[in-house]
Image (cartoon, rainbow, N blue to C red):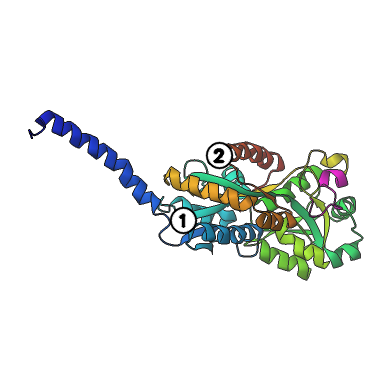
Amino acid sequence: MKPFPRSRRAALAALALSALIPAAHAQQTGTWPSKPVRIVVPFAPGGTTDILARATAPELSRVFGQSFVVENRAGAGGNVGAELVAKAAPDGYTLLMGTVGTHGINRALYPRLPYDPIKDFAPITLVAAVPNVMVVNADKARSLGIANVADFIRVAKAQPGRLNMASSGNGTSIHLAGELFKSMTGTYMVHMPYRGSAPALMDMVGGNADVMFDNLPSALPQIKSGKLVALAVTSAQRSAALPDVPTIEQAGGPGLKGYEASSWFGLLAPAGTPADIVLRIQQESAKALATPALRERLEAQGALPGGNTPAEFARHIEAEHRKWAEVVKVSGAKVD
């Protein structure tokens, strides 16, 4: 048998090499995950971001056969954890449970943000959207005669600065929801930022803080226990988890027409993470969020499960940038 001409042998070699390149890439990403994956929560344990991450991680661990470990890296309104993920290797082993704060608000608040919310991340999927809830300490509500939002405004205006407002940190959605309320009602409350929602709630329950615009899932247990009183939810519509609690617009009257300050939470990877890994995480997350068990668990806490595509999530993030930049400007909110 005659050997192939040299030109034909070269062509066949080139064809074989071109076939091996995508095969090698598929083999490399196809083995993912071959070790534990960490989901960085940029806030303290016990808050809504943490709750949602810990609800999602076991489902991903089950599907992929590897541990998805939640790691809390709190600080600077979520910027510490977000920066860590932005600078991590884009190999699919470090993910961020991002929020409306880290990816919708902080660019407008921080003049020198240590990461770019758009360029430094690959959006994966929205995990959940939740309303915030305006809560007051139950004992103080009774002593001050606060039964609704109108009562609260009356007390706040009568004694400017007497009431203090707890938040999960400067520039978070919880902080800005309160700043927007102050701006629209002409009230003044002393802002008390904490390193996460959980320690702020502890001071709320203990009576050291008066009001908080917390994410509904983390505040709900204290509302149900009677230690906190829910005056209103911050969304445009009532929450199924608290059907008898009005929206702030409904409860507050003409001065709060159009008030809306909901929160959202979603998975992101460092920019440059292989697209097939991003898509696998999105698809399995969407399946998990659609299961009755997880869906009912999230809805019981006032969260609306997500599961959208990376492209849809990217468009959502860009729209949130525009919205919250305007809220920051109108409210005059600032960070220290």
Up-down: is 137 above or below 11?
below
Residue that appears at 65% across and 64% down: 46
> Would residue 33 appear left or right of 215 to someone viewing this image?
left
**Of residues 290 and 259, the one drawn nearer to the viewer in this rendering:** 290
> Would residue 231 appear left or right of 47 to someone viewing this image?
right
Percent position (x, y) of residue 137? 81, 64
Q: Earlier in the sequence, mark 2 or mark 1?
A: 1
Q: Amino acid at mark 1?
A: Thr
Where is residue 107, by image quadrant? top right
What residue span does the magenta drawing correspond to?
240-252
Residue farthest right in this picture:
145
Residue farthest front in this picture:
1
Q: Indicate the secondary structure of the residue bearing disc 2.
A: helix
Residue that appears at 87% across and 39% down: 254
Give how far apart the Cα atoms at labels 2 and 1 are.
Answer: 19 Å
**Of residues 116 and 15, the one drawn nearer to the viewer in this rendering:** 15
The residue carrying mark 1 is 94
Percent position (x, y) of residue 288? 60, 53
The residue carrying mark 2 is 314
> Would residue 107 appear left or right of 223 to someone viewing this image?
left
Residue 325 appears in the figure: yes
Give the quarter of the figure containing the N terminus. Answer: top left
Percent position (x, y) of residue 106? 59, 47
Q: Amino acid at mark 2?
A: Ala
Residue farthest bottom in this picture:
206
